[in-house]
Image: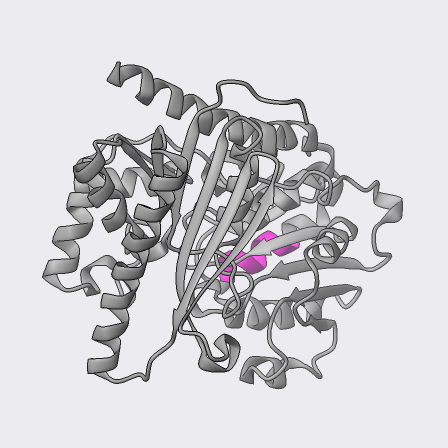
Amino acid sequence: MTEQKNSIKALWLCSWFPDKEQEQNGDFIQRHAYATSLHANVTTIHVAPCSPSKMGTTNIAVETTTSAHLDEHILYYKKRKNTLPHRLKSVCQYFFQYRKWLRQHFRQNDLPDIVHAHITWRDGLIALWIKRKYQIPYVLTEQWTIYMNDGDAGFNHFNIVQRMLMRKILRNASLVLPVSTQLGEQLKTLFHIDYKPIGNVVDTSIFQYLPLEKRYEIFTFIHISDGSKKKNVEGLLETFVEFHNQYPTSRLQIVGLHPNLPIVHQYKNQNGIDFIPNIPYADVGQKLAQSHATIVNSLYETFSCVIIESLSCGVPVISTNIGVAPDIIKNNNGIIVETNNASLLSAMKEMYNNYNTYLANQNPIHIQYSYNYKKIGADINEVYSNIIQSKK
């Protein structure tokens, strides 16, 4: 990597980030940090509770990882019991330790040019505090599905104080950077803010095109997820059983579900279905590239990295109308379906019977160009530059 001169100094406040407790928590934010560090000097900070067994005798611990133009810091504090008084103490400790660390960091490293908060709640509160105390502008990347969900996990489920604070955080950002147009429009409707969509990244060294002759011999659909409710894996499995009865020379691979989940036990002996537990990221890329079509059956999403990863491999996608799907599934490179089994079944039949049409319309080079590390990093750095210039 060539040495950067006069680079922007960006401080990232990461509500989600991979840590000891959740190794894949916000890994897409970490990839965003790598991308941005190709163009700017990035310092990330993530503050998280940690179980006493992993903390040892200390109450506070900081892990630091340093690479070219990227410093990653994780500040751990000892997790408390799950009672109301202990939860309140934990929240207080979270903000106290966060601000203490930042004050020390600013004394040792000077102030950043810009702050970049990731996820409005809770680190957006810290970004708002920095703006008011130090007059440093902030941008906000949002990826949370709460804005797309009207149910128990939706935005309206938050109490009135939290909703008020989240509205204040979003409206005080110099610019909001949702990961998809669909999410941006929802935020605009809820909060009347301006936005610029900047998507997640695809690691083009992992998600690469494989010619048809190097893919599985059996026609293979693949689904990659943790099996959470919003992924609607149950609907997918029900549909595939019906599909497989009509097309027995087919297979469904489901990657990422924990072996002890009830739905795995329910379907593990079903013909044509293979459950593959959590595997390394590079192995996911290999499984994906060897497959014939990817299925994303989510009820709601803000982006869905699996879609760009699949198209980067030249693998057609069947997806519900979520996240980035309406932006890039078009011109017969995949199929957008309704959130019901009948629509999914019809699309699976269409993909199976007319596969060569969908394969011929793949454009992995375009996807790789649009979502690679360098391109996404440049888009973020351009936002920084415009905001900083506007202050002068």
Which of the 4 image quarters holds residue 89?
bottom left
Magenta span includes 213: no
Residue 95 visible to an observer of this rendering: yes
| Vertical placement of residue 243 versus 124, above or below | below
Q: Quadrant of the C terminus?
A: top left
Name of the residue lying farthest toward the right: 213
Q: In this picture, which residue range is highlighted in magenta? A: 342-349
Please indicate whether residue 356 sits to the left or right of residue 69 in the image. right
Q: Could you say which is closer to the camera, residue 67 or residue 215?
A: 67
Q: How many marks?
A: 0
Is the image coloured rainbow, by chain, by secondary structure, or in one colour? one colour
Question: Residue 331, how many percent across, how many down?
Answer: 58, 31
137 versus 291 height, above or below: above
Q: Residue at x 55, y 85 (%)?
A: 262
Q: Is residue 354 left or right of residue 213?
A: left
Which quadrant holds residue 277? bottom right
Residue 278: give x, y in percent of width and height: 65, 68
> Which is the main secondary structure of the residues drawn in magenta?
helix
Quarter of the image containing the N terminus? top right
When asked about the image quadrant of residue 69, the answer is top right
Front position in the image: 69 or 351: 69
| Left or right: 21 in relation to 264 | left
Q: Is residue 190 left or right of residue 242?
A: left
Instruction: Provide residue 14's location: percent of width, then percent of height.
Output: 40, 50
Is residue 190 in sight in this rendering?
no
Rendered view: 94 above or below 356: below
Q: Residue 104 versus residue 172: which sits nearer the camera?
A: 104
Residue shown at 35% from the left, 53% from the top = 101
**Identity of the residue drawn at 41% across and 48% down:** 302
In the rendering, at what x and y percent does residue 119 appear? 34, 50
